[in-house]
Image: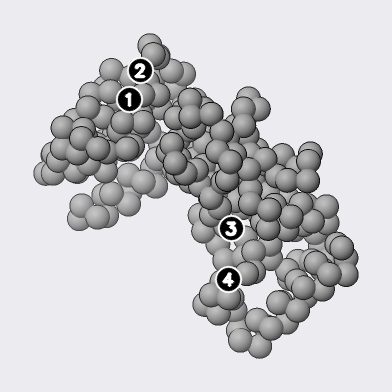
Amino acid sequence: MDADLAQLAVFQALSGNWKDAINTNKKILKTHPDDIEALNRLARAHAELGNLIKARSCAQKVLKFDPFNTIASKSLTKWKDLRKVEPGSSSASFAKLFLEEPGRTRIVSLIHIGDAKVIAKLDSGDGVDLNTASHRISVTITDGKYIGRLADDISSKLRKLIKLGYEYKACVKSADSKEVKIFIREVKRPGKFMDVPSFTSERIDYVSFTPPELVHKKEVVHETIQEEEID
């Protein structure tokens, strides 16, 4: 039952239903007051509705049970100098677009991470921009502040696909002082390449969802795009 409630709470958060998320997490905490994940979710929900006093209280409870909890620590740092936030100011509702889908999504770790103060303010689900102005793809938040860039291999691949007409959206998967991961999703594919997904390097993406006779075909088509149409 608690597992079902936890899944419901996560879904409500991803959908931006913060009031419902608060009620669901409170139900969990009635029977398990030391549930750290529920407390962190409750803190986030209160913050999204603009109630930083309750949000801080929940995060502080987390640290009583787990003094080294990075989510609670980062949240308290983020809220330290804030008196209020605009309800629903983050882009968590944007995050519901980022459910894993073979061939269309990829989790990527950024390199050359930006300023620690900028990173500290990132939350899972925050939308980010992929900037292709240079020969590498840099990643920024909506106000243009740099948070990192893609490694050369994935950067080169996506730049080529974007030139062909592919389009992508991205959001923060996780962030701390040592590592930032983003979730990239293909949201548009050119008509003539409808059978060619963006992310095909992991063979398991095909094997679990595609008839074996089509696996080889798609790999060959993708190589053809890269070698003949892009280069």
- Which circle's residue, 3 or 4, is located before the other in the chain? 3
Amino acid carrying label 3: it is Thr
**Count of labels in the image:** 4
Element carrying mark 1: helix
| Res 186 quadrant in image | bottom right
Q: Which mark is residue 105?
A: 3
**Category of crowding for the residue at label 4, using alpha-carbon neighbours closer than 10 angstroms: few (below 14), some (14–19), many (at least 20):** few
187 over 64 or under it: above or below: below
**Residue at image mark 1:** 76
| Res 45 quadrant in image | top left
Amino acid carrying label 1: it is Leu
CB-based contact (under 8 Å), mark 2 and mark 4? no
47, 123: nearer the viewer: 123
> CA–CA distance between discs 3 and 1?
31 Å
Q: Which mark is residue 2?
A: none
> CA–CA distance between discs 2 and 1?
6 Å
Q: Is residue 160 left or right of residue 76?
A: right
Q: Is residue 155 left or right of residue 89?
A: right
Q: Is residue 60 left or right of residue 184?
A: left
**Residue at image mark 4:** 202
The location of residue 15, given as percent across then percent down, is 45, 41
Q: Which mark is residue 80?
A: 2
> CA–CA distance between discs 3 and 4?
12 Å
